[in-house]
Image (cartoon, rainbow, N blue to C red):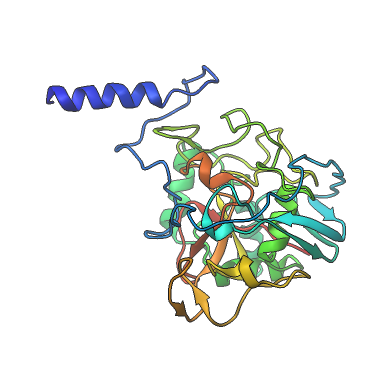
Amino acid sequence: MTPLLALVLVLGGCNGKSDTGDDAHRKQPESDPIEGDSGGPEGSETEEDVFCEGPTVGTGELVDSEACSDGVCPVAAGEFVMGSVMDRVDECPSHRVSLDAFAIDQFEVTWDQHDACVEAGQCEAPPAHCRTTAEGWVDGGSVANLPVVCVDYSAAQAYCTFAGGRLPTEAEWEKAARGVEGTRWPWGSEAPTCDLTNYRFVVWYCHEGAVDVGSYDAVTAYGAKDMAGNVWEWTADHYDAEAYRSSDRDNPTGPTTDCHESVGGAVVPCFDRVIRGGAYNVTATNIRASARSRMEPDQYDTNLGIRCAY
């Protein structure tokens, strides 16, 4: 090892130390990641916000009205703050959106729940190597309560139909994660730590993979858990980097034509779908409650799962 490389590694280790003081369960990735890495498909990162203008909307406070029952959390009708002017350009502008009442899963869909759909003949099993990967996260133990992964968009839709629901719209997902006043993180304003969620702190992982759903006490205003980190979650909407500039303010469902892969970019056919929430292998920037990413609908990954709406 060259002296210069050794110095880089030492500095990286210092910068990667969390303020929780508990490094026993953190693992260092094989290479230093980029702080802005989304953990999504290659090229999914959005550009730095240099065009976003407008007021910050909402107080950012966590308004508590949780009342979950049997693993489902109701979300009352009304307005909420969607988007951000402080972060990435595809989240701009902050604006108020009105939604009808709906409900959302309290937890990400588990392997056990998805296996029931497979046994009923309504879902296809994820590839075998994905279950093997999940078994590695629990050292060969039961994957039953881990979030199911390696489901593409159609597979996610199929499961939610089996469960009597559907995929949430992007707006529904964000309201469930942020409450009505646009809180920055699902649990409030406190910056993430490994005591709050399963994510990547620069060059350190809280965990090497996903953990059992509900492992953390942190909840959203409506009582949902794991809406930051653990695994990404599909939403129903097509991805459009300029969606917030012209979207409906009442029950938006996203565009179906004339999408933009980047702000100011060319108009393209709508294809990619929005994924939300971040994952165990992404940084804090990407687990914010307003952060957006995208995935081709026929693709899957070991950090991408499901949460249904009703």
Q: Nearer the viewer, residue 309 or 12?
A: 12
**Residue drawn at (46%, 69%) of the image:** 264
**Residue drawn at (65%, 41%) of the image:** 185
Residue 57 placement (x, y as % from top left): 72, 51
**Residue drawn at (49%, 59%) of the image:** 150
- Image quarter where the C terminus lies is bottom right
Question: Taking 123 as reference, is 9 above or below it?
Answer: above
Q: Residue furthest top?
A: 21
Q: Is residue 112 left or right of residue 149?
A: right
Q: Nearer the viewer, residue 245 or 236?
A: 245
Count of numbered badges drawn on the protein: 0
Q: Residue furthest left?
A: 2
Question: Taking 27 as reference, is 302 above or below it?
Answer: below
Q: Nearer the viewer, residue 183 or 263?
A: 263
Residue 77 placement (x, y as % from top left): 87, 61
Can the viewer see residue 5 in this picture? yes
**Residue drawn at (64%, 72%) of the image:** 246
Can the viewer see residue 124 in this picture? no
Give the quadrant of residue 163.
bottom right
Q: Nearer the viewer, residue 220 or 118?
A: 220
Residue 306 placement (x, y as % from top left): 62, 58
Residue 85 placement (x, y as % from top left): 61, 51
Q: Is residue 249 left or right of residue 283?
A: right
Q: Is residue 189 left or right of residue 282?
A: right
- Image quarter where the N terminus lies is top left
